[in-house]
Amino acid sequence: MSAEPSARSFDSSYPDPGDMLVVRGGTPLCGEIRVRGAKNLVSKAMVAALLGSTPSTLYDVPAIRDVEVVTGLLRLHGVRVESLGDGRLVLDPANVETADVEELNVHAGASRIPILFCGPLLHRLGRAFIPDLGGCRIGGRPIDFHLDALREMGAVVDKTPDGLVITAPDGLHGTTLRLPYPSVGATEQVLLTAVLADGITELHNAAVEPEITDLIALLQKMGALITAHTDRLLRIEGVPALRGYAHRPLPDRLEAASWACAALATRGDVLVRGARQADLMTFLNVYRAVGGEFEVDDDPVDGGIRFWHPGGDLGAVALETDVHPGFMTDWQQPLVVALTQARGLSIVHETVYENRLGFTDALVTMGATIQVYSACLGATPCRFGHGGYRHSAVISGPSKLQGNDLVIPDLRGGFSHFIAALAAEGTSRVFGVHLIDRGYEDFGAKLAALGATVDGPAYERAGLRLAGGPLEAAR
């Protein structure tokens, strides 16, 4: 599809002009797309394959950049990664070895996944090197939780100019841990380390997101002994060895919600095949409260959820993000774009990441009326109330959005900018499209399938090159 390029000249402060899409807005998104395995589970499942004594098979793997990054890291450690087509990956850890530091550093800044290699590599090699970590710049994601847990389990952490060298001179052992905050990453770290540690590990204040539950199910298939108790308590009894797994991950509930918000903001009608109601119940409640409609199809093969704007005015809401089972922080950004089209004042209190409302600055340049405050505009206990972080927003609508130049700040914020461009009148140029590749498969192709008018230097890479399965690097 094509759109007339904007006559605006390129500003030298913009990212690579070749990493740009031109979006002609004002057309409702209508049609159907499919979501595959969850980004926030698939990459962790790939790391878990290191723990097995036999090959693992992972199904429904999306063609996203994070899969490419983890594939590269695994191969550097001697794991054979092979694509069998149609989203199937086979991971054979028979020849795990220490990776070259310089080669690992090539991946520095590309992903935060390397920190989760610690436990598996300590069990397999007795040593792990972790390069500098990247990921979306949406607020502090301290790895102290990870490192403190590893130390409690017997690891020794040495900082070097290139990264972290982690060893376990006396092996890894079970212990009792309490997370200061129910961090998803730290919970994954403990699970991936404790399953082969000597003794019993009790993790208090653990994250309980659906992706965590799915990771526990995968590890159980490998032979792990993990019990989930009430009050966020996980009990892991270390076992001598684990085998490989065959696992189909839960569908990506974050991508499903993003397309749902796009349907709402553009007054469209989108069927998201693969989406599951059970994973989205909190989101669906808010979606309906705003005025969106949805219909669930539970067919095990072609089922999904249809999301649409029923006409008339959307309603303002007050919401707060929180850890599961609360309203996910990853749902907040795309929903805020839809809320710019709701009548009245909506209030959003972000309690998970302190800098996640920075993306609203771009929406204001497009005509949205959004004010961001450092005060806590909500009742949920918040870690940022006295830190001066702008983490609460008041959105006044409906606003008529106008096309503009947009620079993608992070994965979810970037999708939200695309939603705004699609809902706006006129043409927008969206820069930094490569960040979308991290978590959204076939992005350009899906936009086209829903009737969006998109073009630009990044179109082929963002859509067509990724169509049909795992990335070329995973073959």
Image: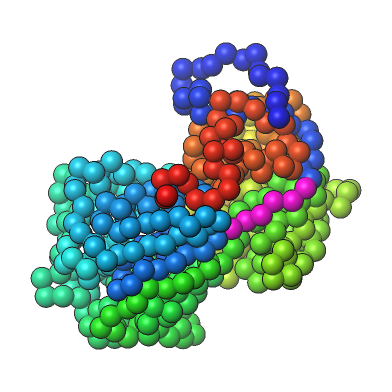
Furthest residue in direction right, as rendered: 312
Near-viewer residue (145 or 64): 64
Classify residue 102 by image quadrant: top left
Could you tell whether 4 is left or right of 52 in the image? right
In the image, residue 67 above or below residue 12: below
Near-viewer residue (380 or 82): 82
Near-viewer residue (335 or 172): 172
**Residue 413 x, y percent position in the rendering:** 56, 43
In the image, residue 463 above or below residue 171: above
**Residue under the image location 33 percent in, 58 percent down:** 80
Q: Is residue 177 magenta?
A: no
Could you tell whether 244 is left or right of 300 in the image? left
In the image, residue 312 above or below residue 465: below
**Residue 361 x, y percent position in the rendering:** 58, 35
Q: Considering the image in quadrants, where does the N terminus appear?
A: top right
Could you tell whether 288 is left or right of 430 in the image? right
Stretch in magenta:
31-37
Could you tell whether 314 is left or right of 357 in the image? right
Q: Is residue 35 magenta?
A: yes
**Residue 354 x, y percent position in the rendering:** 47, 51
Q: Is residue 226 visible?
A: yes
